Image (tube, rainbow, N blue to C red):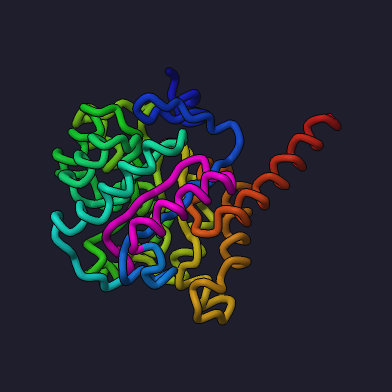
Amino acid sequence: MTERVERERRWWQCGSFRISLETPLVMGILNLTPDSFSDGGRYFDPDVAVARGLAMVSEGAAMIDVGGESTRPGAAEISVESELQRVIPVIRRLRAAVEVPISIDTRHAAVAAAAVGEGASIINNIMPLVGDRAMARVAAESGAGLVVMHMRGTPTTMAALASYGHVVEEVFEELQRSYAAALAYGVNPEQIVVDPGIGFAKTTRHNLALLAGVARLRDLAPVLAGASRKRFIGELCHVPMASERVAGSLGVSLWCVSQGVSIIRAHDVKESCQALTIVNEIRKAKEMER
């Protein structure tokens, strides 16, 4: 592939799934944590979590992102064993019940490997890949799709590292290093999408600047963006409750797809899918008028 063709790649290889990115897609968020910032542990019970996963698919989610560890600012790390106990039973049950790809949201290679072994097709890794051969090896050997996200430090330390001269270019350069590391460790470019890491080691001002320049990241790979219900939306809209930030989240999502973002990671799947459907239909109408 030429560099230009690769930059504008309109599909994503995730194990046996070849996901078309011709129109923007929604990745549904399924948090299996008792301390989630967005839903307060609502889906900590496996039965409730599986039911929510099924509901998200019926609402239009193109993929389900299962996470067992909170990564909100200041979150404490849990053991790999605890994370596995949370995510594996749910992934196993969802894999048997749905036909969309399942993603594992983790920063631990052992969890990613176990999840892929149970049928997950995407690894949503929040940590930089530079130096992380273990995580890259799981993606390379399994062929799973890989989300390369920007973050500095860990959820515990990242707030202190939110310092940039030019946030868009610095995030681009740091993502570029992770992307190059993934390739060096054997991951195929077709497996990779990039994520700007909204809210991870970034202030509200950084988030806004990064969203304004998010199209820049398409020079690396297709882009996934996850701003759903995040703190900066609450700050800007004066909405302290995360669950009440749906409209603000949709505003961010619509901006992102207008800038060429391919995948929106969202808690509110039904609302997000409706919004993207309208955008897609308007685009089709515009093309027919040409």
Q: Picture coordinates of residue 105 (x, y %)?
A: 32, 50
Q: Residue furthest front?
A: 47
Q: Picture coordinates of residue 38 (x, y %)?
A: 43, 69
Residue occupying image coordinates x 37% and y 38%: 95
Residue 175 visible in image: no
Residue occupying image coordinates x 53% and y 46%: 26
Magenta highlight range: 44-72
Residue 258 visible in image: yes
Magenta-drawn stretch contains 189? no
Q: Is residue 281 left or right of residue 149?
A: right
**Above/below status of 160 relative to 256:** below
Residue occupying image coordinates x 25% and y 28%: 142
User: Of residues 44 and 208, which is closer to you in this image?
Assistant: 44
**Above/below status of 148 relative to 143:** below
Magenta-drawn stretch contains 46? yes
Q: Is residue 86 left or right of residue 49?
A: left
